[in-house]
Image (cartoon, coloured by chain):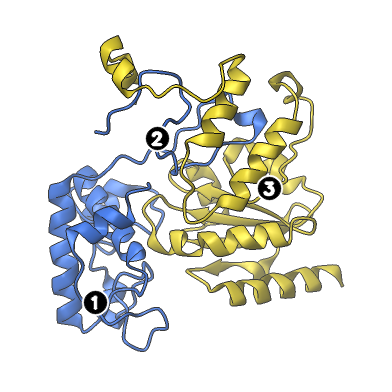
Amino acid sequence: MDTLMASSSATAAILYRPPVLPLRSSNSLFYIGSAFTRKPLFGNHGAERKLIHSFQHSSSPSSSSSVKVQIKCGVTEINESQFSEVVLKSDRPVLVEFIAGWCGPCRLIAPAIESIAQEYEEKLLVVKIDHDSNPKLIQEYKVYGLPALILFKDGQEIPESRREGAITKAKLKEYIDALLKSGKS
Amino acid sequence: MRALPATTSYAVGFGVSSFRTPPTHLRFRRVITAKAEPSDKSVEIMRKFSEQYARKSGTYFCVDKSVTSVVIKGLADHKDSLGAPLCPCRHYDDKAAEATQGFWNCPCVPMRERKECHCMLFLTPENDFAGNEQVISMEEIKESTANM
């Protein structure tokens, strides 16, 4: 992708569509781009709007390293290096979805997972992990069939929570409710 | 390849739906989920194969054709990169070895033996998600995967 960015200025002039607001810092550049031009995938409107709001409220990147990760909106994609911090040390139970790029069922359940993430925002954190870029994690948790769902609580995997394959939204809600209830007792 | 504006990494009609905007602390790190498009030729081959195999096995495509399209593209992608259409809905420790071994080459052994396709490409009529079609056109594939 980077090589395409080195095209001539003439091409750039033709293809470049200037953002609506004047450019300031690189922070606002990202903000503008993501607010106005990105197309949502499979109806993620809610998640994207919320992401933008959270970006507005959050401060500059310098605060990122020391501040605990505040993932508040929809499903966040994470990788191996963040797994320990985000999943194992989370104060809420975490639903981890393992996905693959060209996996049909993963796309099919994406809206259901998204709406669960928003509905259960306070009680549950939902993250997704791409299998190709995180092989070590896959090997550790022995996840081979995708999509796969595992619920983590207090840094531990809940054994009965493993689920593989597509699932309807109703069944997904049942599954989550049952696991959250059993976790509390 | 799509023409890209020669500017920064934010999206201008870019269709970055392969990954959402990462949270702030990740924003300045390039998290690239590699998802190159498979070649049209491979997609066409896998499309024809899917139609033919659905007919042969008496199975049907998913009611939601975008699932079918995504899987066909996944098969095409593996065909391009590995020479064999490895099942796109699985993780492999060693893709090349798996492609040679063949258990998960589409049609995979579970499908051939028990008509079990967990990619939801070939669905038996009793399956809740099964539609009533055994055909899918290139336009349908392109349309449903256009925002990827």
Chain containing mark 3: A
Q: Closer to the camera: disc 3 or disc 2?
A: 2
Answer left or right for A172 relative to B53: right
Q: Colour of chain B?
A: blue
Residue B27 at what x, y percent from top left?
59, 28
Answer left or right for A93 relative to A1: right
Chain containing mark 2: B
Q: Closer to the camera: disc 1 or disc 2?
A: 2
Which residue is labeled 1 in the image? Answer: B112
The Cα atoms of the two marked residues, 3 and 2, are separated by: 24 Å
Answer left or right for A92 relative to B38: right
Furthest residue in direction top, as rendered: A9
Amino acid type at circle 3 is: Cys
Give the residue drawn at x 79%, y 59%. Answer: A123
The Cα atoms of the two marked residues, 3 and 1, are separated by: 42 Å
Q: Nearer the viewer, residue A132 or B31?
A: B31
Amino acid type at circle 2 is: Gly
Residue A157 visible from this viewpoint: no
Which residue is labeled 3 in the image? Answer: A73
Amino acid type at circle 1 is: Arg
Secondary structure, mark 2, is loop
Residue B48 at what x, y percent from top left?
13, 64
Which residue is labeled 2 in the image? Answer: B13
Furthest residue in direction front, as rendered: A20
Secondary structure, mark 3, is loop
Furthest residue in direction bottom, as rendered: B126
Q: Nearer the viewer, residue A20 or A77?
A: A20
